[in-house]
Image (cartoon, rainbow, N blue to C red):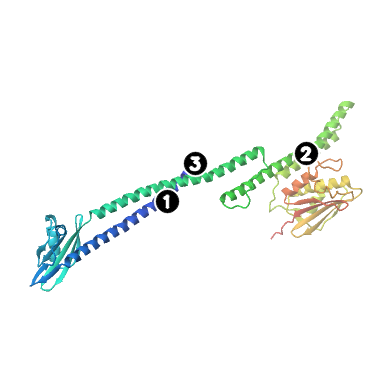
Amino acid sequence: MAVTGFRKRVVALTMLIATAVVAILVVVSHVLLSRVTDADAHDLAHTRAEAVAANVTAKDGRVVLTENGSEALDEVAWVYTDGRLLDGNVPPSMVDRVEALADSGRSQTASVGDYLLYARKVPIDGHHVMVIVRVDLTPYETSEQRSLTLSLILGGLTILLAGGVAHLVVRRALRVVHEMAALADEWGHHEPGRRFNLGVPRDEFGELGRTLDHLLERVDNALADERRLTDEIAHELRTPLTVLRAEAQLAQLSGEPVPPEAVLSEVDRLDAAITTILRAARARTDKGTRCDLRSAARQAIAGRAVEVAFPSKVEVAVAPDVAVSLLSPLLENGLRHARSRVWITARTQGEAIVVDVLDDGPGFDSAEVDRVFEAGVTSGDGYGLGLPVVRRIAASAGAEVRAIADGRGHVEVTLPAARATT
């Protein structure tokens, strides 16, 4: 319905513009034609008057015509001498006006009904001679009316043609949009990875196709991100749930109650996993957020045997609980795989703080260094949060985490440094 309304508005606007243009052209052409016909009528009147005046001469003190005019000319041309009609037949309806022009003694034009009158003074010594001619304006007015009617008809056809062309052009243009929308909708249900791939945009529709490709890419990424989150949740919650189930089955077989410490420990681990995953999904970087990295590291260590080599004061632009949730899984992972030593350092790199979590274990395989952050990938048994959630927490906090294959356990976390307050 909205597309139809848009099409109607475009067609209506096109016809409105065409109407305005046609109206202007009709008015201008009619004015120009009127001026041309008026000029032709005056030229004809002057020509007739000069033709008659050429036959007027003086002979023996009298004004005479050298040639006799035809009866037709007598009806449209008259010669007055000293206020007396010398030649021609003046219609009764024009006698007063013609005589007034004859008595005026100067060349001039006048209109009487549908006729143009032109008076021309003939210079003859001793006499007052005036030649007056009549031009019928009816043919000129008829020509103007016919021209105006034809212009209006052609203008109307032009307006209709403009509206029809606009309708076809807009319909054809919107057909492309309809097809693109239908394809995008179909791909969204059956082939979400498909794209228009129209190449370098050559027109507005090419730009629209590229925009839709970017939009589909973002939607696809969002769906993939949701799938990854689901996988990570399933992976991180499976271990504590498995432990709880094993404890319950063991108690069922042995007939002894489940140790409360084991249940509470796994419930706490499960609660920590859920809390951290939700924080990773909801966290956003806040320009005003900051924390002391040394204090966050102490909370993450929680009394475990980890060496700390930090500067005296290091502040990062992340929330304290996010920093703890980011470092704790990395420290636990290092403790699980270390032979005897785990340590953590911090250094400044431009406008960022780089934290290195290291252990003297076997480290990461260079061929698998990019896969350690994928859900389900593990190098041994263990509990708690995995590296995929660490990556999600880092991304939510505007940080970056990566594993380094250098012959030892080494994970590098790059955090945005807190800006100095003024």
Towards the viewer: 350 or 48: 48
Mark closer to the chain start, 1 or 2: 1
**Disc 2 element:** helix
The type of residue carrying mark 2 is Asp
Towards the viewer: 168 or 205: 168
Q: Would residue 136 be found to the left or right of residue 261 on screen?
A: left
Disc marking residue 296: none
Q: Which numbered disc, 3 or 2, marks the residue closer to the eye?
A: 3
Q: Residues within 10 Å of mark 1 (few under 14, many from 20)?
A: some
Q: Position of residue 255 (x, y in %)?
A: 88, 25
Disc marking residue 17: 1
Q: Residues within 10 Å of mark 3 (few under 14, many from 20)?
A: few
Disc marking residue 4: 3
Cα distance between the residues tagged 3 and 1: 20 Å
Residue 278 is drawn in which quadrant? top right
The type of residue carrying mark 3 is Thr
From where the camera sits, is residue 303 visible? no
Mark closer to the chain start, 3 or 2: 3
**Disc 1 element:** helix
Disc marking residue 271: 2
Q: Position of residue 289 (x, y in %)?
A: 71, 52
Residue, x 30% and y 50% (percent of image)? 146
| Number of numbered callouts drawn | 3
Residue, x 82% and y 49% (percent of image)? 369
Please identify the residue farthest to the front as the structure is shown: 67
Cα distance between the residues tagged 1 and 2: 69 Å
Residue, x 12% and y 69% (percent of image)? 128
Q: Would residue 334 be found to the left or right of residue 318 on screen?
A: right
> With respect to residue 18, does 189 lie above or below?
above
